[in-house]
Image (spheres, rainbow, N blue to C red):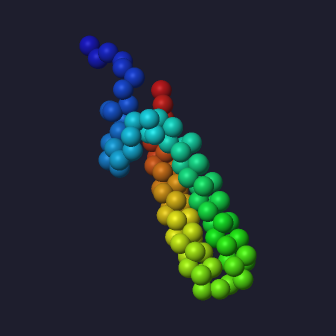
Amino acid sequence: MNAHDDNNASLRTGMRRVFPPWEFRNLRFWASARIVAGSGVAVLAVVTLFSGRFTAEAFAWGELFLLGAAMTLAAGIWELSIARSAPPRT
């Protein structure tokens, strides 16, 4: 007989194995947190550009912040798409 267990390893196939089990269980939450954090870093980049009066140093820091924001937003959107494609829980 197949006993029911709470192990999510059988549900974790393909790219879902990239995430640790504690993150996979709450993937929508972590994806949303990454999207919010990426948006915050993007706002920080804009503030840096305007407060630095568009100097070369402000552009360098702004580019650094925008790169981090882009990577964080991309990871959050990617995780959200994985969470949406998961089979429904029974």
**Residue 52 in sight here:** yes
Q: Which residue: 63% across, 79% down? A: 58
**Residue 81 in sight here:** no
Q: How far from the left and from the top, in percent, is residue 64?
A: 53, 72
In-image side of 46 versus 83 (left or right)? right
Q: Is residue 67 above or below residue 25?
A: below
Query: Residue 68 versus residue 25: which sits nearer the camera?
Result: 68
Query: Residue 26 versus residue 4: which sits nearer the camera?
Result: 26
Can you name the residue that lies furthest to the top here? 1
**Splitting the image into 4 quarters, where does residue 29 fall?**
top right
Q: Which residue: 56% across, 79% down? A: 60
Q: Which residue: 53% across, 45% down? A: 30
In-image side of 17 versus 46 (left or right)? left
Q: How far from the left and from the top, in percent, is residue 70?
A: 53, 66
In-image side of 39 versus 1 (left or right)? right
Q: Which residue: 48% across, 31% down? A: 89
